[in-house]
């Protein structure tokens, strides 16, 4: 459905940062387009929750690792819903720690395909359109692995390090054309049942209890910061910032 | 006068970021305490403007380079006005470019005294109080010189580099006690008549025209980001971020 | 031919850093194995020059972008020549500046394939062998694009940023097993006819003249530093360092 | 005594990095001038050891925290011994971990005075002379605290962060004049009886045993890297590098 509202597009819209960002932007007057790989039911629940709260939202399934999917999504959204004012790339590529010997070609390539190549594809499909309109925002959820490589993170860190440098090249080309690029280093665990929750399984509750009160990043709070970033006037843009819970040690400190 | 509002204290309250931050926090329900070195009249104008807009504000003159001044200010504000909820250290130490041979002992020491030692003193006077209360925020306005040293910036970069590392040590000690520390890298010229304006003199207007529309950091926009930082819930704190106008090249890029 | 000498293996052995490193290690008592993609004649000239100087060298042609090539090279060298004591990954992926719209999928993927995936493959083929032997060194020639993304460098910076984070993960896993990993940020033009020379063509001489005396990185000097790195005792290892000509502005400074 | 050899001057010449660097440069044909704050006997032993090994050395006592001492040392050495070709600033300011409340004004200022202001003074006294001669090297031993601030390091990190930015400003001004500046991040414990040994006292041996074989930075190995840095041709200079034992986790990794 076409909308008269500005469009917010999120790739990687689960029950964590992506879903909460969609809610936040919908509450703020955007039409939120939520895209994710699978779980059509879960996606519909998110869309419905936004509608029930009086907001506008649409859902799309897409596999960002396949050719043309991202490009077609952007084309489709821009044509059938409206020009994307704010896009959030919110896919990660964390596969847990693996020794080098246990990191297969397929894992290493998939990390790149999802975490470096996919945001490149989103940017190439979308940012020239934003530049032509002289405005727009691309927010990229990133991770500690974008700024330092820990043991066992061969695939993840290589992919995220590439993502960070990509964001700097995008910013260098598009900021002077009026398009804001923000790279957000999520430097702590997120209270997200679809990602961390699935990774930890039944240990998730114990992990949360161990972390204590407010010891995991509340995805709604992250979404609020994304909203703030997307609405900084162009005279005062932030390109990079970090986020972590108060109880967590920043990546540069000893544990 | 004692207040029932939370207190916002800014050291370095001119017509730029400091003054606008005071206005922003006063508008948001804080009692703003504005401290600066000189120009009692200018200070009173800022305080009056806040009052006229329906806010609460007080002014203080202090020379942050002298012993005991910052400590007494904190003591006085906490006793006579109320507990400081958010503090902004907003003094710089830019003296323009000077060759090493032309950088005197006095300049080098003054840079340290204002830009490194003064925020240390503010932190030591204030943060144990905040830690005891289990909450509070310290925002430190910083500069590109905190992350890279350019030619001629011997005093400024040494002082700002020290400031940045100090903020990381403060964060490491106080974040786990519930106190938020944010280090903001202002990576572009601010539209501030009291600092950049005075430095450039009658060339300021030509400089602004050359920079083009929205080509200088609007201090009101910076103040909005400070407001956002101070109100991030403790599950999702940002320690460092950069800010610059859309037309400005980030410090890590070629001009 | 089998050798009684320790083996130095370089992937990316042209007339620049790679070839000079081979000469340096051969002069220091290593058997140098030079691998490059094409120009069998040029390769033979490098091998002959080393032999003529009294050193030992072998040449191999390989296309690092193809499956199994690097893995087979390592297997072949270790079996037929001897255990690799020091390896140098010296392939770049610079394609000049291109706008995002002009950066094709093929370019972006090739950048990754040569600059991120190829060193991962070398590491996975070689480093477990080194770890088993409890010693060895991997030096990776890197570039400014590994630490900041400039306009037009979408492919190159994403690939090099991934390379840098990969090197940190390799170091984290293998340093405690006695294998040294060094990531060298080449932050200036190299006096290399095979790469920069070919890129600039007939403008190369004018470029060199413009840069002035010692204004390009002498690849023999870089090779001396690689030699030093490879022979630091394990109590005092360097993981990262930068190199540039005296006349060049570091990447973090304004031009 | 005047010398025909090039002069190597080290400030902070104990039995660790400073003393070993003096030995290394003396063995390489320099006249080594060793300066330290106290222990005239220990200083004389170092000078004698160099002489006994066939090298040239002189000793000087100086308190780098006092006015004019560094300036007079440079003046005296240049006049009575010879032009300083390589200088090493090797004083630290580590005082162990202290909470903010326990960090006195005196400690914070002394940290700056020794770790930031003293190298500035050495640079200002020496580098214009080097620039006039069109050559020379300044090596600065630095620490992890220069790149990240850990809890309890308020004084040390602020001082070292300032030192690092100072080195970048020195490099920006003096590299184009032919003077090499190198900032070395010592990111691990040094096997140095005069500093770490004194700090740990009788626990030093147990600490070394716990660290295992080659588990502390061998100061002689660090000295070899300093020698290498000082002799890089100007076409291929390194400004910053890190050093740590193979068993130590780099500062950017989790412990």
Image (spheres, coloured by chain):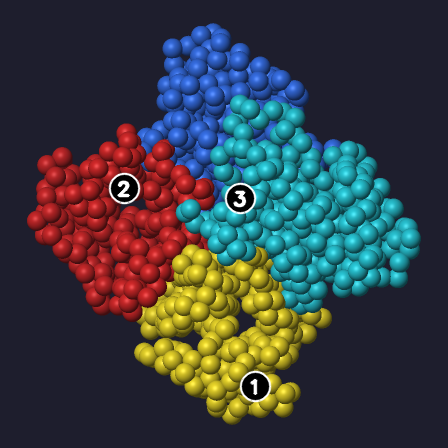
Chain colours: A red, B blue, C yellow, D cyan
Q: Which residue was labeled with disc 2?
A: A190
Q: Return the mark for residue D100.
A: none
Instruction: Write down the chain letter for disc 1.
Output: C
In-front residue for pair B95/D91: D91
Question: Can residue D89 be seen from the camera position used here?
Answer: no
Q: Which residue was labeled with disc 1?
A: C56
Q: Position of residue D29 (x, y in %)?
A: 80, 63
The image shows residue B32, relative to residue A137, as above or below, that is above
- Taking the image as shown, residue D213 lies to the left or right of residue A47, namely right
- Taking the image as shown, residue A59 lies to the left or right of residue C163, namely left
Q: Which residue: 50% across, 13% down?
A: B77
In-front residue for pair B216/A88: A88
Residues at marks 1 and 3, common chain?
no
Nearer the observer: mark 2 or 3; the answer is 3
Q: Which residue: 46% across, 33% down?
A: B171
Q: What element carries label 1?
A: strand
Residues at marks 2 and 1, common chain?
no
- For label 2, the crowd category at 10 Å Cα-Cα, with few meaning under 14, some 14 to 19 and many 20 or more, is many
The image shows residue A116, relative to residue D161, as above or below, that is below
Nearer the observer: mark 2 or 1; the answer is 1
Instruction: Write down the chain letter for disc 2.
Output: A
Q: Is mark 3 on a helix, strand or loop?
A: helix
Q: Which residue: 51% across, 85% down?
A: C3
Q: Which residue was labeled with disc 3?
A: D207
Distance Cα–Cα, label 2 vs label 3: 38 Å
Distance Cα–Cα, label 2 vs label 1: 55 Å
Q: Where is residue B157 in the image (x, y as percent from the top left)?
A: 62, 42
């Amino acid at each position: 459905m076409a909308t008269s509202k500005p469009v917010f597009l999120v790739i990687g819209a689960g029950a964590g940062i992506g879903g909460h960002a969609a809610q936040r932007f919908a509450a703020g007057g955007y039409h939120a387009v939520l895209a994710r790989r699978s779980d059509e039911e879960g996606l519909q629940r998110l869309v419905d929750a936004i509608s029930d709260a009086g907001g506008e939202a649409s859902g799309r399934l897409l596999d960002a690792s396949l050719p043309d999917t991202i490009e077609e999504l952007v084309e489709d959204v821009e044509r059938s819903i409206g020009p994307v004012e704010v896009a959030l790339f919110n896919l990660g590529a964390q596969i847990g720690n693996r020794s080098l010997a246990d990191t297969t070609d397929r894992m290493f390539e998939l990390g790149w395909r999802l975490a470096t190549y996919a945001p490149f594809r989103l940017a190439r499909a979308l940012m020239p359109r934003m530049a032509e309109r002289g405005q727009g925002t691309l927010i990229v959820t990133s991770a500690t692995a974008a700024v330092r490589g820990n043991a066992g993170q061969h695939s993840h860190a290589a992919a995220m390090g590439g993502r960070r440098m990509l964001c700097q090249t995008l910013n260098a080309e598009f900021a002077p054309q009026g398009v804001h690029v923000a790279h957000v280093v999520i430097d702590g665990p997120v209270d997200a049942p679809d990602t961390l929750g699935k990774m930890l399984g039944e240990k998730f509750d114990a992990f949360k209890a161990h972390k204590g009160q407010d010891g995991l990043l509340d995805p709604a709070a992250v979404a609020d910061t994304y909203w703030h970033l997307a609405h900084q006037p162009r005279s005062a843009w932030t390109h990079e910032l970090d986020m972590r819970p108060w109880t967590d040690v920043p990546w540069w400190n000893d544990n």
